[in-house]
Amino acid sequence: MSPLDIYIVHLYKTLIDVSPESNQTIVKLHTKYLEELGDISFPLLRKSWLSVLPARQENREESILRYAQDEDDLECALNKLKIFLKDLVQIYKFKVINNHVHIFLHRPFVFTNHLSSILKANKLYGGCNFFSYNIEIVSEQDIDNNDLNVWNLSILRLSILKKVADNLIKLTTSSAQHDSKKIYIGLNKKQNFPFLVVGPVMNQKGVKDTTNSAMDLINKRASDMRMMAQHRYQVNIKADSDYREYFHKLGVSSVTIELLSNKPHKPIKVMLNGSSNVNKGPSFIFYNCARISVLLKEFQRKIDQSIYTQLPNVEEIDVTLLNQPEEWEIYYGYILQFPILIKNCIKDIEKEIFSPQNLITFLSNLSGIFSVYYRRVRILTDPREHLLPLIHARIYLIKTLQYVFYNALQILNIDPITEM
C-alpha cells in the first residue's frame, strides 16, 4: 500500500471507523493548485458520507467531524483530527472551502518520510500487491509472430495493449500465487468470460484502416521524430546505422503512446499522410526524460572534476530547502501518487475496465510541470559551499523523478530516453 493510500485509510478510520473500498472517491488527493487547495480534501457534511457510513439516524446536515468526535466547534474538531493523525502524518494547516476540509501537509515531514524508501525501491517503485491471484491475458488474435509488415494497425494496437496489461498485472500481483484467472482481449468479443474489447484504428476518413501496415506507421513516426529533432531541437543527425536504429526506436515509442492515448475500447484515428502534430506529445515526454538523464550526468561529471562534492546520504539532506511550488507538485502530485496511478490503471480489469491512457496523461502532465521547473529554476548552480545543500536536495528529488519516468516508460515497453 502506498503512503498516500495509508493516509486515506487512517483518515477514514479516524472519521467514520470504516476502511475505504478500493474505488473510494470521497477523500481526494490533489495534483494541482496545491498552494491554494492543499493536498487532501474531504467533504464536511455528513450527507456526503452516507454511502459508506454505518446506518444511523441522525441529522444529515451535521458535520462529519461531529459524527466522529461529538464536537460542535469546528476548529477544536480539526485540531483533534490533527492530533489523531500526528504519528502518521503531520498537518500544517486546514482550510474550509465550500463545505470541504482541505488539508495542507507539513512538507518536510512528507519529504523526509518517503524519499529514502522510493530510492530503495528503484525499478520496483510503483508496484503493489493488489491482486492475490495470477491474471493471464489471452489474445483472441494471433499476435505471436510479431510481423510488423503484415499486421494492420488494429492488430498492432491490440498487441501493445496486451503487453502493457501484462506489465501492469505483474507490478500489482503478489509473488508465488497459485490461483489463476483468464481475461481475454481482442478486436471482437467472442467469449462469455471477462473480455477487453480493443477499438479499431481508423484512417482520416473515419473508417477502419486496412491499407497501412504496422511498419508503415512506425516508419512514418520515425521520420517525423527525425525531422522534429533536426528542426525543433537542433540535433545534428548523422547518416549512420546507430542513428537509424535510434529513430526507429523513437518511432516505435511514439506509436505506442499514440495508440494508447484513448480508452482501449474506443476507436482511435491515425493519420499517416500530410503534416501531423501527433508526435509533439510523445516527443515532449521523451525530451523531458532526456533532460533528466543529461542533468544527472552533468552533476556526476562535476563531481568527477571535483567541482561538486559527493552526494551525501539521503538521511543527511535538508529537505526544508525544497520550497519551490513545482518541487512539491512534482513530489506529492506525481512521485508519491505514481503507485496509486498504477493501481487505478488495472484494478478493475476483471470488470472489463482497463485504463492505460491514464499513464499517458500522467507522463504528459508530469513533463509539463518538470519543463516549467527546469526553465524557471537553475538546478546545477555555482559550486559555492552554502549552495551545495540545495543542489544535493534537488538532485535527490530529480533522482526519484527519474525512477518514475523510467518505470512508467518500462510499463509501456519503451526504453528510457537518455539523450535527444
Image: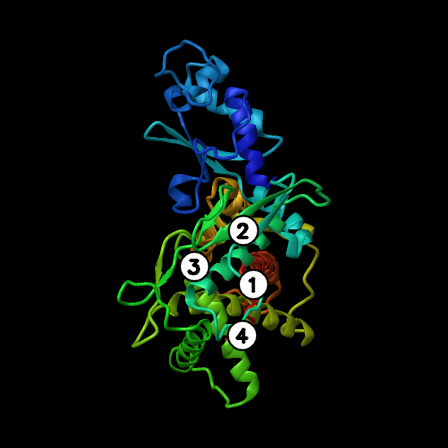
Q: Which mark is residue 364?
A: 3
User: Distance of mark 1 from mark 3, alpha carbons?
Assistant: 17 Å
Measured as percent of width and height from the top left, residue 325 is found at 45, 51
Q: Residue furthest bottom?
A: 239
User: Distance of mark 1 from mark 2, alpha carbons?
Assistant: 20 Å
Residue at x 51%, y 38% (from the top left corner): 105
Q: Residue furthest left?
A: 205
- What kind of residue is marked 4? Glu
Are the residues flagged by discs 1 and 2 in contact, CB closer than 8 Å?
A: no
Residue position marked by numbered label 2 in the rendering: 335
The answer to which of 407 and 288 lies nearer the viewer is 407
Nearer the camera: disc 1 or disc 2: 1
Q: Earlier in the sequence, mark 1 or mark 3?
A: 3
Q: Residue furthest top?
A: 57
User: Distance of mark 4 from mark 1, alpha carbons?
Assistant: 18 Å
User: Distance of mark 3 from mark 2, alpha carbons?
Assistant: 14 Å
Q: Earlier in the sequence, mark 3 or mark 2?
A: 2
Q: Earlier in the sequence, mark 4 or mark 3?
A: 3
Residue position marked by numbered label 1 in the rendering: 413
Residue at x 61%, y 40% (from the top left corner): 131
45 to 35, vertically: above or below = above
Dot 3: element: helix
Relative side of 341 to 389, left or right: left
Are the residues flagged by discs 2 and 4 in contact, CB closer than 8 Å?
A: no
- What kind of residue is marked 3? Ser
Residue position marked by numbered label 4 in the rendering: 419
Dot 4: element: loop
- What kind of residue is marked 2? Ile
Are the residues flagged by discs 4 and 1 in contact, CB closer than 8 Å?
A: no
User: Distance of mark 2 from mark 4, alpha carbons?
Assistant: 22 Å
153 to 223, vertically: above or below = above
Relative side of 310 to 394, left or right: right
